[in-house]
Amino acid sequence: MKTILILGGYGQTGRLLAHYLLDETECRLILAGRRPERGAALAAALNAQAGQERVTTAAADAADLDGLAHTLAGVDLALIASSTATHGETVARAALAAGCDYLDIQYAAAKVAMLQRLAPEIERAGRCFITDGGFHPGLPAALVRYAAARFDRLERANVGSVIAIDWAALDLGPETKVEFVAEFMDFDSRVFRDGRWQKLGLMSMAKPLTFDFGPPFGRRACIAMTLGEMDALPECIPSLRETGFYVGGFNWVSDWFVSPLVMVGLKLAPRRLLSPLARLQFWSMARFARPPYGTVLQLAATGQRDGAPHTMTLRLTHDDAYALTAIPVVACVRQWLAGPRRPGLWFQGQYAEPEALLGDMARMGVAITTEESGQPSRMRPRPAL
Ligand SMILES: NC(=O)c1ccc[n+]([C@@H]2O[C@H](COP(=O)([O-])OP(=O)(O)OC[C@H]3O[C@@H](n4cnc5c(N)ncnc54)[C@H](OP(=O)(O)O)[C@@H]3O)[C@@H](O)[C@H]2O)c1
């Protein structure tokens, strides 16, 4: 039986990862963090859910290389669901030292660059490291790869998202808020258009792409956001002329006033202003959030099939953004467990086999609908085996 340690195992995402992993795998789980006593009640509840002792807790700090490597001894997979991107290298090196595989769910450009530098070492060690897991990052490239198999010639494939969360109802750690806002410093909007990668910069805000997400969200303007997992798509799908990932905003106050202010503030004094600006950003997101709440990820694709124009809309919906983060990770972990072993550094959106990923996600409660050249259908859940 394999053992998975979830760093951040009792956080918002970590607890859902634990819940679905317990249902979907036979693995033993360790919920780890700096205050493991916070995970004790959750571990007890999960063991009661499983009807056996499969979940324990452990103390682990992402900033402590030796301590973390010690805690990871005997673990098969380190699942990094903590807001610890700033300690990314320490965590990755601890996993290498302990000889375990690795999967993280953070969105942080510096973390990806660090892992790319470590890639030769990861390969030499024969380890499998999966980065940018979750929903976004994590799914957009997999959706484009799913579509490519249904076209003779896929030409245009854009992915948009809406995340409507009742932020006031969440109890996020201060590090999580700071990590989220710190990414504003590196915000980048690279898309592939007319057969080449282009940086849209402020153009992205002036000319957003509109997606029709259906009820209850309807048509929403979304701005481009760089995701590393998309980079390899034009090479894998040579017919592709346009692809990119786009995000909808939070609410009009955060989008038009607070986020621009936060970006300017971070340019002026990143170190001094990061914490107060993170508090301001999350205050505005919580104060002005309005229902309906829920999350949608949608692919809009066009191209050719059987000598005729073909279109495809693929829509993934869940009421809970955190569940939509945890479910694809667990579906990916199922593929990692099933093998064959694939050593090296991967993006989740490139590692996962899309058809099985989506089928498993449908079984775990994500509503997945497709419409191909006007023909609607709903994805059938894949049997659990
Ligand atoms: N890819 C996606 O789609 C996606 C979606 C949502 C969230 N995320 C990412 O998931 C991560 C967690 O987000 P969340 O909302 O679940 O956060 P959260 O609820 O605030 O939980 C954070 C967890 O990390 C632990 N932690 C913080 N610092 C740590 C350290 N130095 N060492 C060990 N553990 C530490 C915390 O426990 P202690 O404080 O007790 O240590 C807590 O369990 C973030 O990086 C976020 O960006 C990704």
Image (spheres, rainbow, N blue to C red):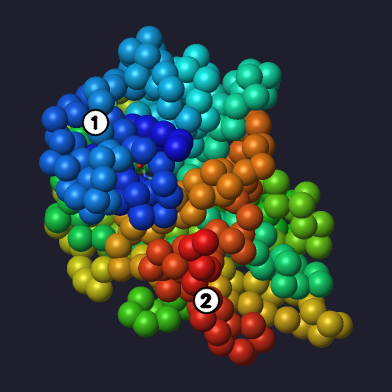
Query: For the view shown, which residue lies furthest in the right direction?
Result: 307
Q: Can residue 169 be seen in this view?
A: yes
Above-or-below relation of 42 to 238: above
How many numbered markers are drawn?
2
Circle 2 residues within 10 Å: few <14, some 14–19, many ≥20: some
Nearest to the observer: residue 211 or residue 124: 124
Which comes sooner in the sequence, label 2 or label 1?
A: 1
Q: Mark 2 belongs to which amino acid?
A: Arg
Q: Mark 1 belongs to which amino acid?
A: Thr
Left or right: residue 149 compared with residue 251: right
Whole-percent x, y for residue 136 in the image: 46, 52
Above-or-below relation of 265 to 18: above
User: Which quadrant of the structure image shows residue 37?
Assistant: top left
Whole-percent x, y for residue 239 in the image: 81, 62
For ligand 1, give the image quadrant: top left
Q: Which residue is located at x 20 percent, y 60 percent?
A: 166
Question: Does the residue tagged 1 have its C-beta within 8 Å of any atom of ligand 1?
Answer: no
Whole-percent x, y for residue 20 in the image: 35, 53
Query: For the view shown, which residue lies furthest in the bottom direction?
Result: 374
Left or right: residue 324 compared with residue 335: left
> Which numbered disc covers residue 57?
1
Q: Give the residue number, with chain letter if any, for mark 2.
A: 380
Q: Which residue is located at x 49 percent, y 54 percent?
A: 331
User: Which quadrant of the structure image shows residue 292?
Assistant: bottom left
Q: Which residue is located at x 70 percent, y 52 percent?
A: 233
